[in-house]
Image (cartoon, rainbow, N blue to C red):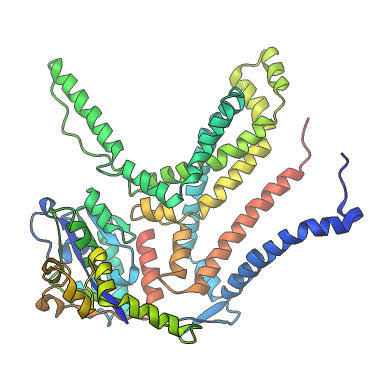
Amino acid sequence: MAEQDWKTNKRTFAAVSIPTLFWVIVFFLVPMAMVWLYSFGENRGLTEIAISGTLENYKRATEWLYLTIFGKSFAVAALVTLICLIVGFPVAMAITFASEKWRPWLLLGIMLPFWTNLLIRTYALMMLLGTQGYANKSLGALWEGASWLKTLVGLQPLPTWEPVQLLFNNFAVVFGLVYVHLPFMVLPLYAALDRLDRSLIEASLDLGAGHFRTIMRIVVPLAAPGIIAGVMITLIPALGAYLTPDLMGGTDSQMIANVIERQFKKANDWPFGAALSFLLIYAMFILIALQSMRRKVPEIH
Amino acid sequence: MPYTWLTLGIGYRKSKVKAKPDSWKVLFDSPEYAGRISWLSEAGDMFRLYGKYLGKSVNALTPADIATIEAMMIKQKPNVKNFHVDDGQDLLLKGDVDLVLEYNGDIAQIMAEDDDIDFIVPKEGSQLNSDNLCIPKGAPHPKNAHAFINYILDGEVDKKITETILYPTPNAAAKALMPDSYKNNPVIFPPADVLAKCEYAKFNPELQPLFEEAFTRVRAA
């Protein structure tokens, strides 16, 4: 079927796009515009905000303190995305090459965590990782076992088991975010890999390239759009995460979203929170713009 | 209308402390329990209680005091395990930490589950708060709001709420219906000499953003 230009069929296209446009304008653009206006305002009393056009909030938001928090949040989100990619790619490959019978079940397994709320999943993970949690209990049992084996062969027993600190540090934040965001990476990767022309892989293998080389030279370049989509869809929510660092982080694990949340709730400083939010939104715009510019580069064959 | 009131103090695991932690010092200014402490992630409460530890009124802090306290917090931070989001009682119950800055009612709830836990209002005094039911000016259905508040503050209804939340109730009719184990519980109703050292905290719109920014600096340090 030939692609239709919207200009030739204006009414149909209008009819189809009006509900979506309405939704985007009323529930996204209008509220965002209000927050944007707040970012140029100042507090007058407890609930009143005067839009005075001041740039004071942006000046405060670009102070070194907040820039370092932005920087740290980007670093954490980038690390989470990288780990998701490294872990998610083989998983997506495995699902793609699984038999017809197994594939829906494997996909279901990836989507299953979405059936439970993020907060519940985070608390479940905390149960697992705590000082008295199952991870520490299992490690402790293994340690005891090793100690017992050593005494059995006449060696000194191991020193007593000290629980590992798995929770309330930066490791826990990265672990928690990877756990939550992994499906976001696997699904676009799977979508890209599934469309891949298998004969190209066979050709590569026939022509003498090894498995690893085939993956790096054939599969990865062809799956690039899926990889980019997966990276964006993981990076952006990871950058805005506040629940995981709040619940699983230590004393130095705050991310920019935590700071923003506190401005709206505890500090009662909406204008400043709005300015911080918009700095984050601008940063994401730049990321997306960079990605779409990449797309326009003609592909090399 | 006040619905509950509350005070902040130290919830702790009795078998894991050498002596009763009867001073804010153990949480705020000492490496004694390094890595086993959890603070409340409420900037205002934290700064006011540090003020109490330094012998100041919770409502008379100045920007200079905030700077002093901020430096003390940064010094103590390596000894603190995390800043809990009002789930300190769970961390204490699960054994993740042994000392936690929490509200009395939350600790009273877990004391019913675990004998090894206790709560103390430090000797320097603490801060009092209350949860209130309010009707905003210009509310469209004030009659319904009044009916709801009357229902919640009804002796029998409030008794049922209080049985679960175990916070001190300001409702004399509900309190009269509660068992002695609640009425005479020193965690829920601290003795008069302890309360005499506590102060009711006022929200200060000028200082609140300063508290928050200083606490953000403490976290980033």
Lateral position of residue A106 relative to residue A219, left or right: left
| Residue appearing at x 55%, y 48% in the figure | A235
Query: Seen from this angle, which residue lies furthest left?
Result: B19
A110 or A254, which lies in front? Answer: A110
Residue B205 seen from this side: no
B32 or A26, which lies in front? Answer: A26
Is the residue A30 above or below the residue A156 in the image? below
Residue A41: image x %, image y %? 56, 78
Image quarter of the C terminus of chain B: bottom left
Quadrant for residue A13, please give it.
bottom right
Residue A14 seen from this side: yes
Image quarter of the N terminus of chain B: bottom left
Lateral position of residue A12 relative to residue A181, left or right: right
Residue B149: image x %, image y %? 36, 79
Lateral position of residue B144 relative to residue B198, left or right: right
Residue A255: image x %, image y %? 45, 56
Lateral position of residue A228 relative to residue B151, left or right: right
B168 or B76, which lies in front? Answer: B168
| Residue appearing at x 60%, y 42% in the figure | A230
Is the residue B219 above or below the residue A238 in the image? below
Quadrant for residue A35, please give it.
bottom right
Query: Seen from this angle, which residue lies furthest right?
Result: A8
Quadrant for residue A204, please give it.
top right
